[in-house]
Amino acid sequence: MDQERRRLLKWLATGIGLSTFYTMAMSAGATRRGDFTVVVIGGGFAGATFARTLKRLDPEVRIVLVEPNPQYHSCPLGAEFLVGKRSEQSLKFNYQRLVESGIEVVYDHAISINPQTQQVYTRTGHIFGYDRCVVATGIGFRHHTIAGYEPADEQLFPHAWGGGEQLRLLNRQLMEMRDGATVLIAAPQDDYRCPPGPYERASLIAQYLQNHKPKSQVIVLDAKPRFAKQAQFEQAWTQLYDYGSEDSVIRWIGAREGGTVRALDREGRRLLTDSGPVAGDVINIIPAQRADNFAHRNGLAADHGWCPVNTQTLESLQVPGVHVIGDAAYAEKLPKSAFAATCQARVCALAIHHMRRGLPLLKPYYMNVCYSLCGDDYGISVFLDYRHDAVTNIIEVETLRITPLEAVREDHSREARSAYSMFESMVKEAFG
Amino acid sequence: MFRMIAVVMIWLTQFWGQVLAQPAVDSLMVSNGCINCHGTSGLREGGIIPSIAGQPHAYLLQTLTQYRDGSLKGTIMNRVMERVDEKHARLLASRFSSINVKARSTVDVHAAPGESIYKRQCAGCHDDKADSSPRLRGQNIEYTRAVMDDLQKGRRTMSADMTAAVSALSDTELQSVLAYLENWTLELDH
């Protein structure tokens, strides 16, 4: 009795009171241990956070995480690595803590899902049966939106829109380019992973050029007429990089000014935009995006390219029994950020926890916080609060608040330090 | 079976009301967004974002309320609290204050000059029995230093007690206290 009460108190202390209540209620015999399996496909922030959250809620559930890479390369803070401000090692995380907590991590490629037999097939021939499958496979690219741009061009014109090899490629190009060279960033139309990402990248490249290659310039060619946190970014660029002046190290050409990139001139190293060709020495093409190929091959994606889900459970609206979380999910109106992805991961874990017990679902809570670094000790942020509408299935934006333009230097310094602090926390939640 | 019902009854009577404002709202869900910065258990290992586990309920609620009404100026927390109502603020304060933690010194701090100053000037309000003041031992030092900086530069208002305590310290003594606090870490106490 005392021991069980202590267990209750302990669970309560770690904030998961309700689950213990039902776990103990169910221990009377309704649920046999180990007879419920969840297969998670993809071990990024979403997949890893989901697996760890469900393991805490339901230690007896068998969780199999299928992920091809033994190490995860983080996208958040990748821009710092790109310009030599951060080691690659500081962006790499493994699955050791997940394994220690009892999650089965299988380093393999998931090939397909059979929703009828509830099985996942992998490249090496493994077959995993599941009660619930959670797909967290992230983004894929729509190369064809830029004429003449083939997947193989990623080697010469890296997108670097994911950790690892692509980031290394662009990093090397930036380090090796001569002073006086031009860096082009082709920013995509919506929706894509990390809406403010291209502009944080442009900011830090501008800083790198200012310090190391002062005769160089970075130009953002944008397929959008405006972008996330635009006023705050432009304020920072003006303060730090003479934005708007003749010798500004950074330029932004929006869709209205003809910035949309229509084609690649591979041999001439030029991007053909609505306002004419623009030549670049380092060309970073961030293509338009959609859910990754796995999601498409398995019938999870809709015509718009993303995976529609029930926003209360993250269960696919197209394939029953399969949930989609993270960047691949179309959970209107959440952005594609690691923050939103991990919020989805916990909503999904709680939903599966409740569904398994036949309990009423909780009203989901979502939030998004996104920090962007504009230079040394200079951060800005956006906060979004949401309200779930169960009737329309839309996660409506309640408030959107960006760092005030009146913010002083100390505020920007605090925001930069908060960016690092939040990153550490999200990594700890996901990977331990 | 009886044993199980008894356990559930105890839990229901003692904790349901304070943890769950309504049955359909789980405190874990309500804190979904908080977790990305403060951790599922409210614990952090360093950084400028504070650990909030085990802080006194009154202190957490007051801090959240001050962020909401703007009397305490943060960066993102004012924006976060803008639409959080009293019920949810209480729920969050309850959830994180009810997490049991203990502070542990990472080195032999007893020889440190800051310890005697801490015990004399700070512990009266900030020790483990603190009820409306924050606990300092085990808090991330980067956060504590930032708050002290805010207090000294007038970005954050000090209570009369705090003003008196701080003004009694020389800058060297204050730095000693901070150096002493740097050697503490926080862990879950099961």
Image (cartoon, coloured by chain):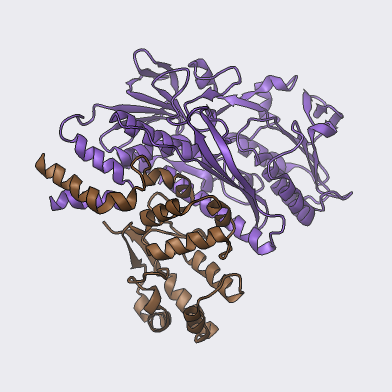
Chain colours: A purple, B brown
| Residue name at image x 81 percent, y 44 percent | A217
| Residue A70 visible somewhere in the drawing | no
> Which residue sits at x=84%, y=34%?
A257
Q: Quadrant of residue A313?
A: top left
- Residue lying furthest left in this view? B2
**Quadrant of res A358:** top left
Q: Position of residue B55 (x, y in %)?
A: 39, 63
A145 on left or right of B19: right
Which residue appears farthest toward the right when viewing the image?
A: A246
Q: Tell which of A29 and B82 is nearer to you.
A: B82
Query: Quadrant of the rendered structure where residue A315 is?
Result: top left
At which x and y percent is residue A10? 26, 52
Would you place residue A267 above or below residue B85 in this image? above
Instruction: From the viewer's side, name the closer residue of A420 and A402.
Output: A402
Q: Does A261 appear above or below A94?
A: above
In the image, A115 versus B5, the foreground residue is B5
| Of the pair A399 and A346, the residue shown nearer to us | A399
Residue B62, compared with residue A319, is above or below; it is: below
Q: Quadrant of the C terminus of chain B?
A: bottom left
Where is residue B165? Give x, y as percent.
Answer: 47, 83
Coordinates of residue A24 in the picture (x, y in percent): 20, 40
Q: Using residue A220 as the reference point, say whether residue A60 is left or right of it.
A: left
- Which quadrant does the N terminus of chain B fall into? top left
Is residue A229 visible in this depiction of the protein? Answer: yes
At horizontal 35% and vertical 31% (from top left) the residue drawn is: A352
- The outermost residue toward the top is A116
From the viewer's perspective, is A62 left or right of A209? Answer: left
The residue at 63%/48% (across/down) is A401
How many numbered discs sit on the rendered protein?
Answer: 0
